[in-house]
Amino acid sequence: MAMVRFGRSARLSLSTMANNRRKLARVWLAAILLMLSAVASVTQQSAAAELDIDTAKRLSLVFLAHGQHRAAHDVLTVLAARHPRDPEILITLSRAERALGQTDEAVARARQAFEVADTQTDRHLSARVLAEALASAGKHTRAQLWLRRAGQLAPTDAAKAAIRRDYAYVRSRNPWAFSVRGGISPTDNANNAPTSNQIEIGGIIFVNPAARPISGTEFHLGGTVTYRFPASVTAQKEVHVAYDARRTMLGSEANSIDPDLSNSDFSADRLAFGWRGRFRRAGGQAVSEFGTRLFFDWNGGDRSQTGLALDAGLRFPLADRQQLRLKGRVEHLDRLDVALRTSTTTELGVEWSFGMANNDYLRIGVSVSDTVSDSSAVARASNRLQAIYALGQPILNAHIAFSAEYRQSLFDQPLFGPDRRDDRAVGLSATATLKQMDFFGFAPVVELRRERVRSNISAFDTLATQLSFSFRSTY
């Protein structure tokens, strides 16, 4: 086959043809825009008569893309009147109304679209557009609820990721924050009984038949309402109120071990009010943290104590992906059940965290504390070491974290006999967060924890294993 060679004149001809095509394209674009402007100026009756539904839908999208919101609104209003159960038309009309500042109409239109939508994609889009309209109307909390609904209906992972970004944006502009928590925790030692019901005092062995572990299931439920004050570059402050409740259902062996025990004996409730502030010097990287909390506790249905806690911390970055946090805490507990056990605890600690290149995360914390009380069962000096390691990549769609903790408490005065009580505890836990199984943005969390307390006084030797099922927000 002969090879055809193009000379300079041929190349110029090709270039000229390409330029002509571009000029022709610009002419057609100008003609289309002119046509769109003409369509925008016609009456609703003319639009209804002259445009079929598919053409009108495309035109409305082009109008929106070019910022011609009024033109899009006029076309879509006619279409909505002709096709009131078309979710695509209603969704696009809601977007146009929101762009025109007609937020109430945009909310109503998006809600109508959600009601008539019969596919997952349309329900997802209408829920998302409704959330956008609510956010534009300043109803951020309702917008967050609808974003969770849109996330639940998201047809793809990319759509769900987009919802998470929208949620973070709306949350950052909402002064109010609401959080809930809850879980179920079966345990083999619901009454925190010792491993042995015998204790030796002065060479004499005493036996407590009721001091035996009882299995059971703990139920936890709580919530927090937070109000964030308008933030500045250097300060962020918030107040909150929180309530947490725990109920216990004892195992069947409870009656044989201690007939006087009832489930209500192990109930616990706490109502707390708090303030927290974070401050940063202009141009600085360190963040100072301060907080205070007043709380009221009930145990077994009766008021047991009132507490006041003051916290302070300083957080600042070290090398790449590393952070150091210094913290201090003072807590006073006014015991209403046993006044002798009123106490004040002072704690100092340091935490170091490190984010690794593979997205694994490590945090190590050390703290020391001293508790002052008139009760020899409460006054003590303690130290604590904790390490948390979280895997950056999921295993079988589960995000895994491990925790290890060591605590030692040396009491100030002897309780039984001449020796001071010395407790040493070791706790291990593994947590799996199943984000792929989230429901409306809440993912199930499974935790297995085992704790062993060894004491020089056998009455305080304990061993407990607990399996917890809870949920955690993925947003």
Image (cartoon, grey):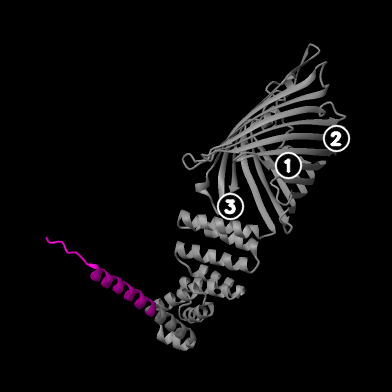
Residue 302 makes an appearance in the image = no
Horizontal arrangement in the rendering, residue 133 relative to residue 410 (left or right): left
What is the spatial separation of the Cα atoms under label 3 and label 2, in whole angstroms? 40 Å
According to the picture, the residue beneath numbered tag 1 turns out to be 314
Residue under circle 3? 475
Nearer to us: label 2 or label 1: 1
Determine crowd level at label 1: few under 14, some 14-19, many 20+ residues with C-alpha closer than 10 A: some
Disc on the earlier residue, 3 or 1: 1
- Where is residue 148? Give x, y as percent: 56, 57
Q: Residue furthest top?
A: 203
Q: Which residues are magenta?
A: 1-27
Identity, as a three-letter code, of the amino acid under mark 3: Tyr
| In this picture, residue 113 sits left or right of residue 180 | left
- The x and y percentages for residue 26 are 39, 77
**Residue at image point 26% right, 73% down:** 13
- The residue sitting at the front extreme is 8
Between circles 3 and 1, the one closer to the viewer is 1
Indicate the quadrant where residue 263 lies: top right
